[in-house]
Amino acid sequence: MYQKNKINFQSNRPKFVKKTREPGFHGYYAEVRDGDDPMRAFRKIKKKQKDDRFFEELKDRQYFRKPSFIKREKEKKRKQTIRRASRENASWHQIPKQRGH
């Protein structure tokens, strides 16, 4: 098992050298070193796609939506966020009622 925190650890694994690529988007990729778990690379790719909102963009572009509809949806989301935040702030400042006194 690879242990990076040991001082005297000598690895027989070849040193990993990141390959340089031309600038621009070339799709999602994750390099797998010898002896590493390929599922970890797959999870990295999934995380990159999630951070880029890749699948959300595909879903949004599946059908045409009028600009006014998009604007209305943004406004709805904004109001929901404000409502949720104000509800959470209100719960922080409430003093619990004492029953029976």
Image (tube, rainbow, N blue to C red):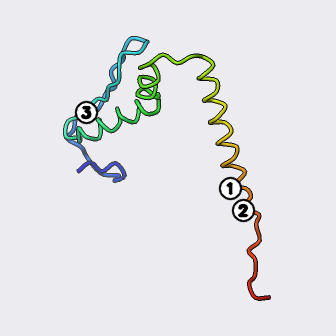
Of residue 80 and residue 30, the one placed in the foreground of this image is 80
Q: Residue pushed farthest right?
A: 101
Q: Tag 2: residue type?
A: Trp
For residue 11, the mark is none
**90, 64: nearer the viewer:** 64
- Where 61 falls versus 50 (above or below)? above
User: In the figure, is residue 99 to the left or right of 72?
Assistant: right
Contact, CB < 8 Å: mark 3 with mark 1?
Answer: no
State the image quarter where residue 14 is shown.
top left
The residue that label 2 is drawn on is: 92
Mark found first going from the N terminus, 3 or 2: 3
Q: Which residue is mark 1?
A: 88
What is the CA distance from the residue labelled 1 to the residue labelled 2?
A: 7 Å
Is 50 left or right of 85, judged from the image as shown? left
SS of the residue at dot 3?
loop
User: Measuring 23% from the left and 40% from the top, which residue is drawn there?
Assistant: 36
66, above or below 6, in the image: above
Helix, strand or loop at mark 1: helix
Q: Position of residue 90 (x, y in %)?
A: 74, 58
Q: What residue would you read off at disc 3? A: 32
Instruction: Classify mark 2: residues with Cα within 10 Å, few (<14), some (14-19) or many (20+).
Output: few
Circle nearer the N terminus (3, 1):
3
- Residues under labels 3 and 2: Cα distance? 47 Å
